[in-house]
Amino acid sequence: MDNKIKKAGMLIFTFSCLVAFGQKVSDYKYIAVPEKFKDFEKESYGLEGFLSKNLTSKKYVVISSDKSKWPAEVGNPCNVLNAEVLNTSSFLKNKVTVQFKDCNDKTISEAKGGSSIKEFQEGYSDALRTALVGISSSNPTVNLAAVENTQRVEVQPVKESPVQTQTKEAAATTFTTSTATKFSNGKLNLQKIKLAEDQFILADPNSSVPYATFKATAKKDVFRVKLANGESTLGYIENGNIVIEMPQTNGDFSRDVFTGK
């Protein structure tokens, strides 16, 4: 009973301290804005230009929705968010919804705004301005889908001297020295991808959602973990292995052990 109470307490602590690790609009640098929004094809009311100007003021790089016009520095299409403005007006109020979708057409953010101004030209612009208030300025971070695509690139091996080989093998035994390494629990083969000094993920190359996201705690080799299904728990390094305390329906925890390959 005491052991269950301790585990429950650890889980509650995790929930209170954990931050969200999902992709946000501010994680991106490039946003594609179409020439015409689908709901405003007959009359745009200048919304495309209004959105572009607002995003530019927040340090985003606005590009065309036509991929053939993208600058070379964009690189992977998954580095770009696609913006769309929907007309969600009611009888008495001009309202819009701004959607931002990733390269897999998944909506990662949706912002709504309304205006009591009845004139369409001013009303829709005012509604869009209201919707964009909560969108943070661009602060690009590592994009998982782009990283996964990079990991699939095959690199020809370079012949190393015996000293270089020994040094490389020694470094491989240290968990934090590799940016991307492979781990398996016997059923799943995942990549460990280092995002920052205090953050890494275990990812399936065939999925756009990390299997687990790890954030360092004040205790060495102990991490707060966010699972793909949204559950939060703890993880730690044990003898070079990555161990995740997996929550069970009865309140207990099982050990999911990933060994380096």
Image: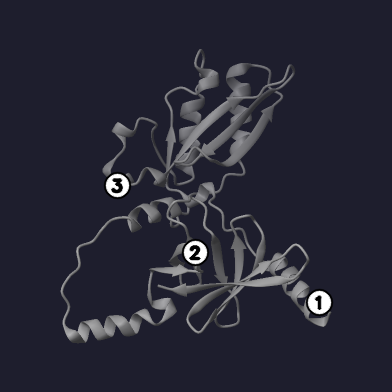
Q: Is 3 on the left or on the right of 226, as rendered? A: right
Mark identifier at residue 254: none
Q: Earlier in the sequence, mark 1 or mark 3?
A: 1
Question: Which residue is farthest top?
Answer: 42
Q: Secondary structure at mark 1?
A: helix
The residue type indicated by label 1 comes to: Ile
Residue positioned 51% across, 50% down in the render: 26
- Sooner in the amino-acid sequence: mark 3 or mark 2: 3
Marks 3/2: CA–CA distance: 27 Å
The quadrant holding residue 131 is top right
Judge whether 48 appears above or below 135 on screen: above
Amino acid type, mark 2:
Leu
**Disc on res. 5:** 1
Q: Residue furthest right?
A: 1
Q: SS class of the residue under badge 3?
A: helix
In the rendered image of this protein, does residue 163 appear above or below residue 186? below
Q: Are marks 2 and 1 in contact (CB under 8 Å)?
A: no
Q: Earlier in the sequence, mark 2 or mark 1?
A: 1
The residue under label 3 is 73
- Could you say which quadrant of the image residue 63 lies in? top left
Q: Helix, strand, or loop for circle 2?
A: strand
Quadrant the C terminus occupies: bottom left
Percent x, y of residue 150: 33, 55
Label ID, residue 202:
2
User: In the rendered view, would you say 13 is above or below 49?
Assistant: below
The local crowd at label 3, few if under 14, some if 14 to 19, many if 20 or more residues have their Cα within 10 Å, is few
Q: Position of residue 14 (x, y in %)?
A: 69, 69
The quarter of the picture where the N terminus appears is: bottom right
Residue count near mark 2 (Cα–Cα under 10 Å), binned few <14, some 14–19, many ≥20: many
Residues 141 and 154: in front is: 154
Q: Quadrant of residue 68?
A: top left
